[in-house]
Amino acid sequence: MPTIREVALLAGVSVATVSRTLQQPERVSPKTRQKVMSAVAEVGYKPNLMAVKFRSGKTHNLVVLVPTVANVFFARVISGMQQTAAEHGYAILLANTLGNATIETDYAKMVQTSQADGLIQLRAFNPFDSSVVNGHGLYPMVNACETLEQIACPVVTLDNRRAAKAMTEHLLSLGHRRIALIKGPKDSPLTRQRLAGYQDALAQAGIDFDERLLFAGDFTLQSGHTAAQQILNQQHRPTAVFCENDETAIGAIQAFKQAGMKIPHDMSVAGFDDIAFARFCDPPLTTIAQPAEEFGRTAVTLLIDLIEQKLTKAPTVIMPYELIVRESTGPAPGFQG
Amino acid sequence: MPTIREVALLAGVSVATVSRTLQQPERVSPKTRQKVMSAVAEVGYKPNLMAVKFRSGKTHNLVVLVPTVANVFFARVISGMQQTAAEHGYAILLANTLGNATIETDYAKMVQTSQADGLIQLRAFNPFDSSVVNGHGLYPMVNACETLEQIACPVVTLDNRRAAKAMTEHLLSLGHRRIALIKGPKDSPLTRQRLAGYQDALAQAGIDFDERLLFAGDFTLQSGHTAAQQILNQQHRPTAVFCENDETAIGAIQAFKQAGMKIPHDMSVAGFDDIAFARFCDPPLTTIAQPAEEFGRTAVTLLIDLIEQKLTKAPTVIMPYELIVRESTGPAPGFQG
DNA sequence: TTGAAAGCGCTAACAG
DNA sequence: CTGTTAGCGCTTTCAA
């Protein structure tokens, strides 16, 4: 790799002049500029940006902690991040953490060791060693999609409670009275929020909350399938199932169909996220659309503002949702709209 | 951010001793080690790894160019990469390139500017400016999933031709004689290879190749749906459709079902990749399983070997495939097995 | 308009 | 076992 020194030597100027030619060409005479540029071309010089970053103290790297890139919703979020980051001259270092705290902590060290300027966490977990955080101030961090409580950092989130309530109301409006809920990962605030919204809607409709209608899930296809089988084994079956994400719903629909049920005739199923597959299900899935790419874009924008000190206090941005009614939900048996 | 100097000052030793204590503690007396460690703890010292990397000339970063993380197959590949990279102390810089040559070239510059040690490309395109490549040697690069012709770099690939032939043979064995093929992106060698495999099987079975059974696609759900509609409009319909990936197949299945067809009774549909959704389709999808995570792991291993000069020449690694027969393929109408 | 020189934080000879 | 020192490649004063 040729260095700036070799260029200087070949052009017969000082390294300072080479640097200036590349950074602020107008401050260099046309003649030297010419000489330098052809020397650059001749040796194929590319500045060592590692050196530049080291010197400037700015890496222009952002770490993103994502539980799993295999989750289609997250994939969209990342897509949005990448785009905005690139526009601002930042690169994304993506960490597929599998929700593992150790891996998250490891990657967070990239910020602590000056390898990245900031971090975006898509899960409700503070990846920075708390002793460090308390003792020596916070590192630039943004929380997206989830809600990291007890830490003062910008948050980009959905009003999950309202959205879940809206979906539950949709099911209620179709005459459903026994509505099961297949939850997301246990320790996630998002899961609690969606549950709360579900309960809100039931309470408002004067329906008693029945804990036996709650089923565990973890946002995977398999977990939806498993939960649906449990529902099928239940004595007094629900007539509708609200799944906390689309993958779960798709897994559940399969289990119901394998058991010979017709969707939505025998069972209504709703999801959450509106991933691409939702529209291509059989039947197409009723779900809540979230602006996934916009989540990513917003999170990156906030983080860069934080890094560049344009932010005075940590805001909470609430993104809009949209109820998408497709064909996986229908009237409850015997219901007269 | 405290530096090594502050630690040295506080511990009353030289910076070299601090560095040694951290790198090779055994070369330092227990007493000084003690002093240094408590000074490190007291100021909350974290080494500036940017400086370390700059000095060592090794970044331990790998750039990965992926057409789109939203493709579930690629998501799995990336997952495998991340894992292996982490094991070797490397980080993955993921670039969601959308198959855009300009974006790819931009990210490739990270290698050229010493911000990353090497690159993995998942598409058949050389992201390095060819003049640079020719003039000044190659950068460490590995091609995975696709086949980058005309460049001598390690390749991790599937025998796409054999795999496609195997799937076509499966369909032929079910009595299908008119088999449509929904292709992948136009300019992809992988697409050509799968087409070749399809033709191999037909030729071997003594069936004339009919160009009207070829349909364009781009690996998206939507493109499968669109192609299936074209098939439905055709005069002399095929009885089976082989899709070059699972997303395409899932899109196609929906279109067929919307037209009132029963799968596989009226139409057999096969995919390629065995993504998670394949098993949860209705009906579950017959497909070719590829060891996606293993692709990622192998590519990273090769790249690291290349970077660390453990590789003398560029190998081509052929990964195994497996024909997964599920319920989306069945006997051709009137066929007596 | 240009050059000399300092220094970013760290490691690795080399001396002691 | 420990300290001194040079230097990685670059930018940026400060002088000339």
Image (tube, coloured by chain):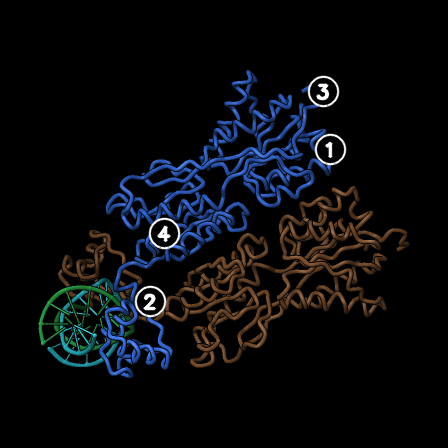
Chain colours: A brown, B blue, C green, D cyan
| Label 3: how many Cα within 10 Å (few below 14, some 14–19, many 20+) | few
| Label 2: how many Cα within 10 Å (few below 14, some 14–19, many 20+) | some
Quadrant containing the N terminus of chain A is bottom left
Image point 53% across, 45% down: which residue? B73
Q: Measure how far apart labels 4 and 3 are at the Cα level.
A: 55 Å
Which chain letter goes with mark 1? B
| Label 4: how many Cα within 10 Å (few below 14, some 14–19, many 20+) | many
Which residue lies under the disc numbered 3?
B334
**Closer to the N terminus: mark 2 or mark 4?**
2
Front residue (pair A286, B288): B288
Which residue lies under the disc numbered 1?
B261
**Closer to the N terminus: mark 1 or mark 2?**
2
Which chain letter goes with mark 3? B
- Please say if A260 is above or below D5: above
Which residue lies under the disc numbered 4?
B108
Secondary structure of the residue carrying tag 3 is loop
Residue type indicated by callout 1: Met
Residue type indicated by callout 3: Gly
Q: Measure how far apart labels 1 and 2 are at the Cα level.
A: 60 Å
Which residue lies under the disc numbered 2?
B49
Image point 41% across, 56% down: which residue? B86
Q: Measure how far apart labels 2 and 4 are at the Cα level.
A: 22 Å
- Say if labels 4 and 3 share a chain: yes
Secondary structure of the residue carrying tag 4 is helix
